[in-house]
Image: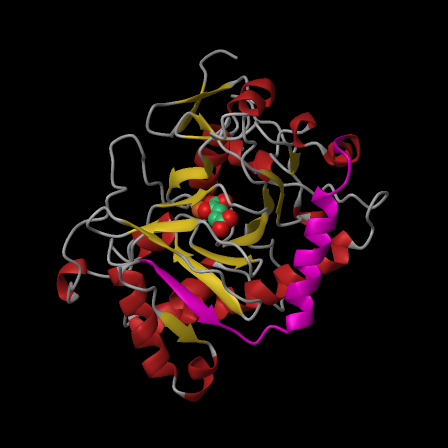
Amino acid sequence: MPPLPVLNLHLQRTNPTLFSKQLVKACHEIGFFLLEHDLPNSICERALSETRLFFQKPLEQKMSIYYGHEPSFRGYMPMGVENTEGKTDGREQIEYAAEYGKWKNSSGRCNHNEEEHFYHRLRVAENPWPDTIQPSLRPAINDYVDGVLKIGDQLRDALCLGMGIDPSHLSDSMFRKTSGDEQEPNFWSMKLVSYPPPVKTTNNSASDTEYGVGAHADSNFLTMILQDAKNSGLQVQTIDGKWIDVPPTPANVLICNIGELAQIFSGGYLMATPHRVLRPQDSRISLPVFYNPKLDHVMESMVNPEELTWNRKGQNQWLRKENALMGSVGENSFKSLARSHAEVFKRHHGDLHILGDGRIQLKKNT
Ligand SMILES: O=C(O)CCC(=O)C(=O)O
Ligand SMILES: [Fe+2]
């Protein structure tokens, strides 16, 4: 089985042209790579251990930040509430996203008379942090996300360079600069995920769901994942339909993959690769960060695909009529949240209707 490409972020500083070339090759041919990075080990280990601590708490404590009370799909999602492709996923998680503070500005509601996009409901002033039961989680996760988003900026610019696009075309119009605060934040999101091992029945067969998360492609621009070193179970689908294992990786490695928005941006040259997670033998923690432009932006192809050299033998398997690829950051993000959390979507967004391909429409006369 072909191993995943390994890149080292240090090369981005010493030889940016070579790094960009390696990056684009990996993202074109498989859409997944392992990245050796220089985010301090202490930040990564602290984020993992604080996450592990949270999931060891009793259910009623974790439910203090339950996500189902709010329309924004943020907070604690217990085992059994999430599905992929109609099958229940075998994981529990906390989902967080960009905090909008003074930019929230939105009623969180939309109606037929307002010029407000339904996906503005995803803007929240502050995430639901479990400060009363674990005040140390918030700073640990904030430090981790800040560091990973900076790596995302570097990878975004390197992707542009490698594709022959001036990086400022993307960074100026679609992304807020990491250091500036005069614009609303980029719509990043993240998960703190716990994959418990399957519960065995007396005849030793697994009694519950087969996958930690079922096969899917990510709807965002670029994903970066830290996992605990002992376990993986993450699998990537190659272009010929085979599943390959992502190995266990230490804290100085991020598993990175292309999302649908980068596929759109590159005219399909970079691939939003299907992946899934098997249930682990032993429990597994992972911390995926989903890097994205601002919520209101609409991604378009910035290259002429015919001018690029295609090395890949086939098309992305995930291009299916059941999955509309929408350049709108807000619409594409809402698609995967609504699909994965049908109950919460119905409860809080009864005025919206989701079509078979994931597009969302306002119901008439609500
Ligand atoms: O936990 C992982 O390693 C991957 C999770 C994932 O693919 C997702 O949440 O989109
Ligand atoms: Fe994913």
Identity of the residue furthest to the bottom in this view: 14
**Image check: 273 left or right of 181?**
left
Q: Is residue 44 magenta?
A: yes
- What quarter of the picture does the N terminus occupy? bottom left
Magenta stretch, residue numbers: 31-59
Q: Position of residue 336 (x, y in %)?
A: 45, 36
The residue depicted at 34 percent of the width and 23 percent of the height is: 356
Task: Kindly indicate the quadrant of the structure image that contains residue 302.
Answer: bottom left
Is 329 on the left or on the right of 136, as rendered?
Answer: left
Q: Is residue 64 above or below residue 22?
A: above
Q: Residue furthest right?
A: 132
Residue at x 13% of width, y 60% of height: 306
In depth, the one of 116 and 309 nearer the eye is 309
Percent position of residue 16, x then y: 39, 82
Task: Please give left or right for residue 336 compared with residue 143 in the image.
Answer: left
**Residue 104 on image: x %, y %:** 66, 43
